[in-house]
Image (cartoon, rainbow, N blue to C red):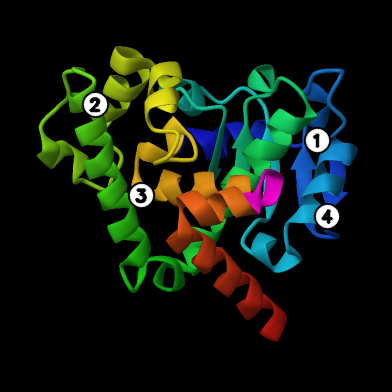
Amino acid sequence: MYIKESSERIKSVHYLWEGRINVYNARELPENVSIDNVLEKVSSVVPSHFMKNIEAIYIGDFESLRARRVDAVYQDGAIYILPEFVIDEDDLLDDLVHEIAHSLEESETLEIYGDGSVENEFISKRIKMHETLQAHNIEAPPLEAFMETEHSKALDSYFHETVGYPVLATLTSDIFISPYGATSLREYFANAFEEYFTGNPRYVKNISPKVYNKIVQLSNLGEET
């Protein structure tokens, strides 16, 4: 995997987070971004047990991230970040919390998705989105495409390039927390998780109550251990 090969070449420890998580090449971040400030903020808003699957953070030029048109990913115990797309400290904070959510999916799959409540909520919102697009005379792919929960390059391209996120955000403001949360079931969960810890938990409860309940449950499970 290209990410692993690249990460081996950029190992330069700058920060030890949570007493065990190595942060590599943090100096590549923009001058206006302090990794100390951002990680301190993450630790203050996200329960520490939610970071249990993270072993390292790599900041560098990763070809695979560019190919996927993303600025951050979680994979195999590590978060990978493209520094050039980090605008400010709030932007990096959002990226890290979002990827922490994906790390939780690795060990808490059954807790998050086992009863089907989050999936059913996501599909119902996709159906409502399809109806909304049609109501505004915007040509959309068949409903069957909106019923899929996995990431689809074709549907992602339709959301991002054909309709456009600004238009989609306006049309679906009462359906999804952000258009990115509509791209797949996993992004739906991570998008709500990010908003819960870096934005407005009440908003998550109103828009995505099933995900809200899962986050509360996961938080409570951590307190019991």
**SS at circle 2:** helix
Residue located farthest toward the front when viewing the structure as drawn: 135
One can see residue 68 in this view:
no
Which residue is rendered at x = 75% and y = 64% of the image?
A: 48
> Is 212 situated above or below 96?
below
Q: Quadrant of the N terminus?
A: top left
Q: State the CA–CA distance, disc 1 to disc 3.
A: 35 Å
Q: Which residue is mark 4?
A: 44
Q: State the CA–CA distance, disc 2 to disc 4.
A: 39 Å
One can see residue 201 in this view:
yes
**SS at circle 4:** helix
Q: Are marks 1 and 3 in contact (CB under 8 Å)?
A: no
Which residue is rendered at x = 63% and y = 25% of the image?
A: 82
**SS at circle 3:** helix
Query: Seen in the image, is 123 located left or right of residue 25?
Result: left
Q: Which residue is mark 2?
A: 133
Q: Which residue is mark 3?
A: 185
Q: Which amino acid type is shown beneath numbered disc 2? A: Leu
Question: Which residues fall within the magenta stretch?
Answer: 196-201
Q: State the CA–CA distance, disc 3 to disc 4.
A: 27 Å
Query: Seen in the image, is 224 located left or right of residue 35?
Result: left
Q: Earlier in the sequence, mark 2 or mark 4?
A: 4
Q: Earlier in the sequence, mark 3 or mark 2?
A: 2
Q: State the CA–CA distance, disc 1 to disc 4.
A: 25 Å
Q: Which residue is mark 1?
A: 12
**SS at circle 1:** loop
Q: Position of residue 72 (x, y in %)?
A: 57, 34
Q: Which amino acid type is shown beneath numbered disc 1? A: Ser
Q: Quadrant of the C terminus?
A: bottom right
